[in-house]
Amino acid sequence: MSDRAEILKHATEILEKSGINPIYTLTVQEFEVLVKASIYAVLNKEPQKIPDDKLLTRQEVCSLLRVSYPTLLGYEKRGLVTGRRAGHRILFTRDDVLKALKKIKMDRNNYSE
C-alpha cells in the first residue's frame, strides 16, 4: 500500500473515531487535528523489514531510506551505497542497504561539523 493510501486510510479512521463524517466539510480545528494525527502516524510507523535474500530495486531502496531518487543517485556517485548490476538494472541486497545507512549517518555527521 502506498504512503498516500495509508494516509487516507488513517485519516478516515481518525475521522470516524472522532465522530466526524468524512463526507462533510471540516472546520479549521478538525482539519488541524486530522493533519497532526496523520503526520504523527506516518512518522512513527514501524520501519519495513528487509528479507535477507531479497534483491531490492532503486525505488525500493529510496522508499526504505526515505530519500528521493536523485538523492540515491548522489549517494551512489559518492560511494555511500553500492549495488550490483543485473542486466540494465541495479539491484541492492539487505547488506548493501544496512552498510549504506551506516555510511550515510557518518557522512551526515561529517557535514554537520
Image (tube, helix red, strand yellow):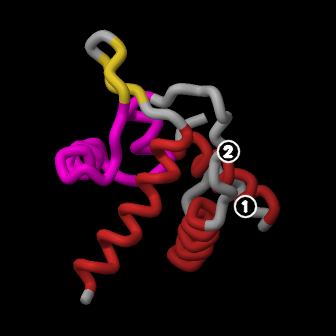
- Is 50 situated left or right of 56 in this image? right
In terms of secondary structure, where does tag 2 sit? loop
Q: As rendered, which of 40 and 58 lies closer to the eye?
A: 58
Q: As rendered, which of 65 and 107 lies closer to the eye?
A: 107
On screen, 11 above or below 31? above
Nearer to us of marks 2 and 1 is: 2
Q: Amino acid at mark 1?
A: Ile
What residue is at 57 percent from the left and 65 percent from the top? Answer: 43
- Is 50 situated left or right of 84 in this image? right
On screen, 89 above or below 96? above
The part of the chain drawn in magenta is 57-83
Q: Which residue is denoted by mark 1 in the rendering?
A: 14
Q: Amino acid at mark 2?
A: Lys
Q: Is residue 77 magenta?
A: yes
Mark 1 nearby-residue class (10 Å; few <14, some 14–19, many ≥20): some
In terms of secondary structure, where does tag 1 sit? helix
Image marks 2 and 1: residues in contact by CB distance under 8 Å: no
Q: As rendered, which of 34 and 58 lies closer to the eye?
A: 58
Q: Position of residue 93 (x, y in %)?
A: 51, 34
Q: Position of residue 9 (x, y in %)?
A: 66, 46
* Residue at mark 2 to residue at mark 1: CA–CA distance: 26 Å
> In which quarter of the view is residue 113 placed?
bottom left
> In which quarter of the view is residue 105 placed?
bottom left
Q: Is residue 42 visible?
A: yes
Choose the circle earlier in sequence order: 2 or 1.
1
> In which quarter of the view is residue 33 placed?
bottom right
- Is 39 situated left or right of 10 in this image? left
In the current view of this chain or complex, which residue is farthest to the top?
Answer: 87
What residue is at 46 percent from the left and 35 percent from the top? Answer: 60
Q: Which residue is denoted by mark 2 in the rendering?
A: 49
What residue is at 59 percent from the left and 60 percent from the top? Answer: 42
